[in-house]
Image (tube, rainbow, N blue to C red):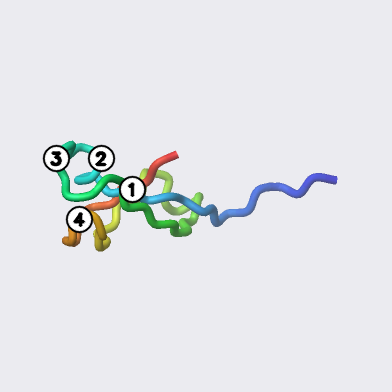
Amino acid sequence: MAKNKGVRIIVTLECTECRSNANKRSPGVSRYTSTKNRRNTTSRLELKKFCTHCNTHTVHKEIK
């Protein structure tokens, strides 16, 4: 028997500055993982996290 999907899912957050900026110091994109409640938060998650490539706090958006 297969179990049904839970309410909480793991999402990946990616830096928006690293993705759009081609002239940055080091190659790569900052990514974090987090969990969200699928029922309460149906839209894409946006959190302000520290980006090691930009050396600043930037907005990280949920990616699929």
* Position of residue 40 measured from the top left corner of the image (x, y, whole percent): 45, 54
Q: Which residue is mark 2?
A: 19
Labels 2, 3: front one: 3
Residue 45 left/right relative to 25: right
Q: Which residue is mark 3?
A: 23
What kind of element bears circle 3? loop
Circles 1 and 2 in contact, beta carbons < 8 Å:
yes
Nearer to me, 46 or 51? 51
Residue 34 left/right relative to 18: right
Q: Residue 58, which numbered label?
A: 4
Q: Which residue is mark 1?
A: 14
Q: Earlier in the sequence, mark 2 or mark 4?
A: 2
Furthest-front residue in view? 26
Residue 39's place in the image compared with 20, above or below, is below
Q: Residue 50, which numbered label?
A: none
- For badge 3, the amino acid type reads Asn
* Position of residue 52 measured from the top left corner of the image (x, y, whole percent): 26, 60
- For badge 4, the amino acid type reads Thr
- The residue at 20%/37% (across/down) is 20
Structural distance between the alpha carbons of marks 1 and 3: 17 Å
Labels 2, 4: front one: 2
Structural distance between the alpha carbons of marks 1 and 2: 8 Å
